[in-house]
Image (tube, rainbow, N blue to C red):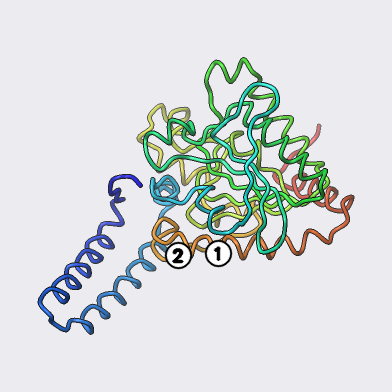
Amino acid sequence: MPIEFILDFERPIVDLHKKILEMRSIASQDGVNLESEILALEKKLNKLKVDIYKNLTRWQRVQVARHPKRPYTLDYVERIATDFIEIHGDRNFRDDPAVVCGFATIDEIKCVIIGQQKGHDATENIKRNFGMMHPEGYRKALRAMKLAEKFNLPVVIFIDTPGAYPGIGAEERGQAEAIARNIREMARLKTPIIITIIGEGASGGALGIGVGDITMMLENAWYSVISPEGCAAILFRDRAFAEQSADALKVGAKDLLELGVIDKILPEPPGGAHSDYESAANIVKEAIIEEMKKLIHIPKDELIRKRIEKYRNMGVYGES
């Protein structure tokens, strides 16, 4: 875990939590009974978390989605799945640590899990390339999806990336082609695909593993064609306008549900997913199981038809 990281709006929560810890320390050392005072403060703390987090701006939710203590794919896999067997490599170039793929069991339902993975410290972040996939990562993910299709297993996907890796090497190895191929193949994959956006969902980097039957999103995640900073740099020539860009892009879960881009918002524990891994994982697990039980009984042809129809109904276009 990283050194303590506190967002500005979290400061009152942290200060009150420290006060509770101090009172518990005094009570244990001096034998003083402060239980009633501590319980009152804990009740106040829980209310404070709810009040602060239910009124976050879009830009504040972007900051929460990037919180270094936020649970990543492997944190969820550890808590919701059993018998996880990871597969490596795209059978073409190399293994991409920015995405993890493997077979697993979620509540006795066998499936394939695919998820973008960041690091909880500098060393792991460098290893995982900050969750930015190379083309071989998208090809590895597609390989895992094809195995799921072959063995009639549903696919569970976790999205959390600031974007696909924009380096020269990635472009030389066909970054755009790899993403485009995944979009095409996922549209017609003959097995259920359940997607959960757990943190950042930026640009084609997210969409390269983001076509599915059900798209769910944690309430403090964000999902957009470009990051707020990138949008600000293009439109305003100044990244300082990132907050205004987040509002203009409508990156929040409520916005995207209204627009029909996602299908369901998953609530987070009071204080955000980074404050309670177990509760966050249970919320995600229950939602995945609920959707999985619905989808596995739909005939494959109907599943694909509904999936394609879902994406065709997004947005507005005209012909002339």
- Residue at 51%, 51% (x, y): give it: 252
Q: Secondary structure at mark 2?
A: loop
Question: What is the x, y in percent for residue 281?
Answer: 53, 60
| C-alpha span from label 1 to label 2 | 9 Å
Which amino acid type is marked by label 2? Pro
- Residue at 61%, 65% (x, y): give it: 286
Q: Is residue 178 left or right of residue 115?
A: right
* Image disc number at residue 187: none
Residue 90 higher or lower than 75, as above or below: above
* Image disc number at residue 269: 2
Question: What is the x, y in percent for residue 131?
Answer: 51, 36
Which amino acid type is marked by label 1? Ile
Q: Quick check: marks 1 and 2 in contact, CB under 8 Å? A: yes
Number of residues whose C-alpha sits closer than 10 Å to that of mark 2, classed few (under 14), some (14–19) or many (20 or more): many
Question: What is the x, y in percent for residue 165?
Answer: 54, 27
Question: What is the x, y in percent for residue 233?
Answer: 43, 29
- Residue at 13%, 80% (x, y): give it: 31
- The quadrant in which residue 283 appears is bottom right
- Residue at 70%, 54% (x, y): give it: 214
First of labels 1, 2 by sequence position: 2
Q: Is residue 169 left or right of residue 67?
A: right
Q: Residue furthest left?
A: 30
**Which residue is label 1 attached to?**
283
Task: Please name whichever residue, 149 or 221, is drawn nearer the observer in this view of the structure.
Answer: 149
Number of residues whose C-alpha sits closer than 10 Å to that of mark 1, classed few (under 14), some (14–19) or many (20 or more): some
Q: Secondary structure at mark 1?
A: helix
